[in-house]
Structures are given as structure tokens and as C-alpha cells.
Amino acid sequence: MRPKTECACRCRAGESPFRTFRRVVAVAVPATLGLEGEGAEPRTRGRPRERGGAGVTGAIRLVAAWLVACAPTATAAPDLEALASKVRAREAGFAKTMADRDHAAFATFLSEEAVFAGRSSVLRGRAAIVAGWRPYFEGAKAPFSWAPDRVEVIASGTLALSTGPVFDPDGRRTGTFTSTWRREPDGEWRIVLDSGCPPCPCP
């Protein structure tokens, strides 16, 4: 993905940077030199000022500052390893809510528009997922557990894939989960997609 850029100049709607540059120069240079119109003599407070000199230097500085302000600057590339570690920790924390039987904490790991695709149904939205998973939090012992064994983050640092084994209460592997995490506007990672393979005789 190409690095994001931003421009500090104030261009009019639909106006190209080149036209903006010409407009700024046409206004700023005569003003800096003290000229009111074509052929006018430079003016100062109380005495005439020769063309050039400090006025020209000021105009050059003004134009140079405009060029620097309008130069696109690439943002620093995200640290993907650090982000992957963050997502791994979030996945582990998500799994801990099941072990701790903490249904309320479980909800905090879900994006508002999350989708959980099960074997026979699909739950859409945080509220539906929280309600659909409530039975799994009933009782003293968790019906299953999971842990991430692989996390990958895309180049922009906004989405991540987490996958790993699912175990029954006796520690026997019964499947594999796959979750997609998204870094949301508040900077926190939350699940937007989740699915798992059917129970299988995994090694």
C-alpha cells in the first residue's frame, strides 16, 4: 500500500497545486515588495524603498515556505511486529474471558458490526453475538478454550488475522478458529469476523 500523504496548503476546490502556487505568488510577491499594481513604485512607511533587497528576500522566503508546506510527507510505516504482538495479546485476553466466565468482558472485544459465522448460523452485530454466546458462559467450567498460534497484520496496520487451535474441557484439540481483528478509531483492536472449522480429529 502506498504511504499516506497530506498537504498543508489551502487549495481552492478543484484547483491544482500549480494553479494555487501561481495564485499565491501573484498575490504574495507584490504585497511583500509593497507594490499595489503593475508599474507601481515600492512603498514603505514614510519613504520610498528600492526594488529588490529585503522585499525580494521576503518574497523568496514566503514562496519557499509555501513549497515546503505543500510538499507531501510520507507517514512512518507501522511496526507490524509490535502490532502483531498487540493482537496476540488481545486474542489471549479474549480467550481468558471464557476461562474466567466473564460474559461482560467478552463483549468488549467485539466490534459493533462484528460477524460470527458458525456451522449452522451467522450472528451479526455485537448484541446478537453477546446474546448467542451467553449459554457458553453458563456453568462453572468453560465448554471449550482457544489460543492463537499465528497472527498476521496487513501493511497499513489496520487489520489482522489470528488463528489457532480450539480445545475441549479435557484439553483435546477439536478444531481451529480464525478471527479478523480491526484497529478501530479509538486505537483498540476488536474482532470483526470470526469462524471455525467443524470438530475434527486434529493431531
Image (tube, rainbow, N blue to C red):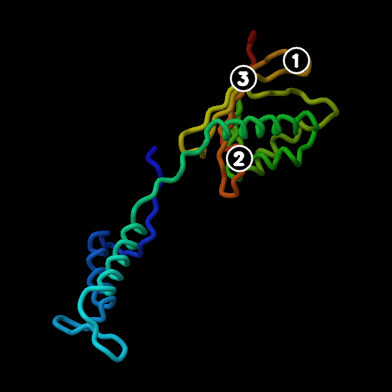
- Does residue 12 appear anywhere in the picture? no
**Which dot marks residue 171?**
1
**Which dot marks residue 14?**
none
- Name above or below for residue 162 compared with residue 12: above
- Residue pictured at 66% horizontal, 39% vertical: 109
Disc 2 to disc 3, how far (Cα)?
21 Å
Q: What is the residue that sits farthest to the right in this orientation?
A: 140
Image coordinates for residue 90, horizontal then vertical, percent: 66, 34
- Name above or below for residue 177 compared with residue 93: above
Q: What is the residue that sits farthest to the bottom in this orientation?
A: 46
Q: In the image, 4: left or right of 30? A: right
Mark 1 belongs to which amino acid? Gly
Screen quadrant of the C terminus: top right
Mark 2 belongs to which amino acid? Trp
> Callout 3: 10 Å neighbours few (<14), some, many (20+)?
many
Q: In the image, 14: left or right of 83? A: left
Image coordinates for residue 123, horizontal then vertical, percent: 61, 36
Residue that mark 3 sits on: 176
Mark 2 vs mark 3, foreground winner is 2
- Residue pictured at 74% horizontal, 23% vertical: 144
- Residue pictured at 85% horizontal, 28% vertical: 140
Mark 2 vs mark 1, foreground winner is 2
Mark 3 belongs to which amino acid? Thr
Q: What kind of element bears circle 2?
A: strand
Image coordinates for residue 185, horizontal then vertical, percent: 56, 49
Mark 1 or mark 3: whose residue is earlier in sequence: 1
Disc 1 to disc 3, how far (Cα)?
13 Å
Q: Are marks 2 and 1 in contact (CB under 8 Å)?
A: no
Residue that mark 2 sits on: 189
